[in-house]
Image: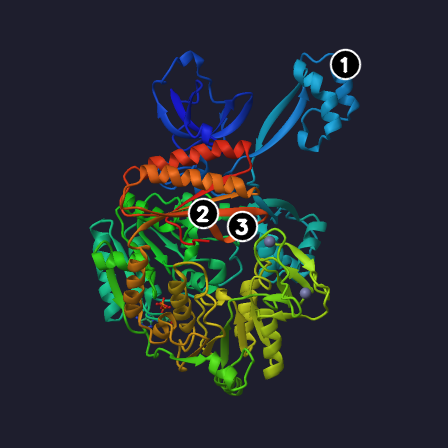
Amino acid sequence: MFVSVIVDIPSKSVNQVFDYRIPDGMDEIIRVGHRVLVPFGRRTIQGYVMNVKDAADFDPSRIKPIAGTLDIEPVLTEEMIVIAKYLAEYYIDQYISVIETILPAALKANYKKLVRLSESAGADARGAFTGLGLSDGSEIKSLNSEALSVLRPYLKSGEVVEETKISQHTKKKTALAVYSLKITEGHLGRAKKQVELLDRIESSSEPILMSDLKAEGYSNHLVNSLYKKGYIDKMNMEVERDPYSGRIFEYDAPKVLNHEQRTAYDEVSASMDAQSAGTYLLHGITGSGKTEVYLQVIQKALDDGRAAIMLVPEIALTPQMVNRFKRRFGDDVAVLHSGLSAGEKYDEWSKIKEGRARVSVGARSSVFAPFENVGAIIIDEEHEATYKQSDRPMYHAAEVAKFRSRYHGCPLILGSATPSLESYARSEKGVYKRLELTKRAGTEMLPDINIVDMSAEHREGNTSIISKPLYEDIKDRIDKGEQTVLLLNRRGYSNFQICQSCGHVPMCPNCDISLTYHKSNSSLLCHYCGYETGVHKECDSCQSEDVTFRGTGTEKVEEILRDMFATDVVRMDNDTTRRKGTHEKLLDHFENDEIPILLGTQMIAKGLDYPMVTLVGVLNADTMLNLPDFRANEKTFQLLTQVSGRAGRHELAGEVIFQTYNPEHYAIELATNNDYRRFYEKEMAFRKLARYSPFYFHVLFTVSSEDVRSCLESTTHIHAALAENMSEQSIIVGPSPSPIERINRQHRFQILLKYKREPALLGVLSELDREYHEKYKKEDISLKIDVNPLVIM
Ligand code: ADP
Ligand code: ZN
Ligand code: ZN
């Protein structure tokens, strides 16, 4: 028997399968999807079995046998192998990099290079070897170059050999447990508590975790006294990492669906019964009960004996969502997101793989949850850009979800209050079936939304970042003991430093971007590459001392609010939530300690649902409008609608204020009326005129290099290749410098291809990619091809 194997070398030149022989005795074991060790050149590396076959494609005597396998059960299902191939082709990437995206990081190979003496080693070699203080299997990473040069002649002669060892990241987690030694006679005497504890331990047929005993009220001290007296012994027991252990989720029963919810549910449910693969766009305003529909669809999948995949933009940002799923489905839920450690992710993944969890709730990559029989796939907030990976492979989760829905014959639901223009346009054409929820699910009303014109505020003499109406409202909420959420999409203290004599603004030396002032550590910081420098009192350019700071970030507004209202403020942005778990802690603090104001960047716009929040303020509704991206209007409308939905979700009525310098801009005005339909029509008219998505498909080429000339040459070359191969209908924009011209010392140039139908495109793209992969190895230049880009920066 033979196998075709994809090897773990992320290079275009080996983006193909290699044949190996299955050694005798392993025929029964090796299957498609197994991780295997294979000889490759002089090394042994990890690979994945793509195919098992009876005959090899060429001389079988020259085919090497595989060296071993890492698994008892294959880690990849046949479905995942097909998906990997599909994605690698669609997004112009390597199989191996897609496979490594599909699998949890813990299963990736971790190579260690070791040296040891071979049998042929002579006295000189042995002397040199031990002289360096080496023993068999010393790691090469720890050898310095001097040591290596001593060894080099013996490596050449084969007396010392280099070996590659593959180690795994997945260490099982263990915890301390105790068990009874069954000593019947003894003198526990009147130590009542100890007798009780010993009974408890003996009543269990398995060792009991110390932590469990503690939870039952037995102190460590008490356990230790039994241990010292020799009644019990301790051991390390394998445990599963459960990031949600110790938390109790109270069961939340299904609600009786309202008419609109029921109509939506019935449609999806019928398609589940028919095992057909339709895509539904669930368009429902915030608070209309979309999540309740998801929950009941998932319940149906479970009742049908199938599994369900639920995608959310970023769970770490929406702990409330996880709670709702845990409360409905309990231990049947596996949670996958970027906040988990590699080990925790692996454990959650294993729960799915082994059938111990039938519902997955997770961010983008959980679309690869290894279920064998999927009954429903749901993508909540489908318009969110986080569903597309910004590094290779630059896949979109919806693309994978559509594939899986066809594979399993199950519906895919895309849900949003503000669908992406692309999805809504598809629902207009009937490619997706649209389901509408137009009313809030409870009795609550939509919040009242008002615009404050900041230019007018300035004319009236208020130069503060808090307008008069917003000030009054916040004050009113504080008096009433209600809560306010404020959005400012800009972190740091001030936007930038400027010299009032010569106008000099300190820039990042690596990027084409001004440095942001952070007061807490008195530094100027680049938000793109992390470059940091101290604040200078004098202008670097003219030495004037007349330097000042302009623009306002969250750090400064926090200070302003504390002064203005003499109250506590919770601030949430990248700076305050860097450490694991801090996000959830800050939100708990806001809710439980009834802090009057929550201030944050767009990370607060999603999913929050607190009964006491009755006011939402957007301090600068224009920040997104000014982005150099054709989706700027759409992003603005989505963010404003989403953050408005945080107000008045329960009994108390909600109010929203947008502060803006563009009060008449349609993205802002229509967001105040919650008028998605009008916004869609206006924005579509603009896209049509400017010939952008959804009227055209896009491919974005970004070339970067430290050398501007190489950038220009390469983009000119790409332009020529496209011009030659694309039809007249397509439009090639550029080459031009990217909106951010330099990041991390790399100059950046781009070309945007807009097309409607180009059957030859895939071939042209993969040819360009291959070419530049070769080039990149020699010259310092890289080409990034982004198929269906969401960000044109
Ligand atoms: P969305 O996901 O659209 O923002 P949710 O599913 O979170 O909406 O629903 C908003 C609120 O209404 C929640 O508190 C939810 O429990 C409640 N809700 C949803 N559906 C119903 C229903 N059929 N009956 C009563 N309350 C409901
Ligand atoms: Zn100056
Ligand atoms: Zn920088």
Q: Name the residue carrying label 1.
A: 124
Q: Secondary structure at mark 3?
A: loop
Residue 750: assigned label: 2
Residue located 70% across and 33% down the image: 142
Can the viewer see residue 299? no
Q: Quadrant of residue 668?
A: bottom left
Q: Earlier in the sequence, mark 3 or mark 1?
A: 1
Residue 627 in the figure: left or right of residue 563 = left
Alpha carbons under labels 2 and 1: distance apart: 58 Å
Alpha carbons under labels 3 and 1: distance apart: 50 Å
Residue situated in front as seen by the camera: 253 or 31: 31
Label 2 sits on what residue type?
Gln
Q: Quadrant of residue 546?
A: bottom right
Residue located 53% across and 86% down the image: 475
At which x and y percent is residue 627?
A: 46, 62
The mark total stands at: 3
Label 3 sits on what residue type?
Arg
Q: Secondary structure at mark 1?
A: helix
Residue located 51% across and 70% down the image: 488
Q: Secondary structure at mark 2?
A: strand
Residue 205 in the figure: left or right of residue 681 = right
Q: Name the residue carrying label 3.
A: 241
Nearer to us of marks 3 and 1 is 1
Alpha carbons under labels 2 and 3: distance apart: 45 Å
Q: Is mark 3 within 8 Å of ligand 1?
A: no
Find out whether the residues at labels 2 and 1 contact each other: C-beta distance under 8 Å: no
Residue situated in front as seen by the camera: 640 or 404: 640
Q: Earlier in the sequence, mark 2 or mark 3?
A: 3
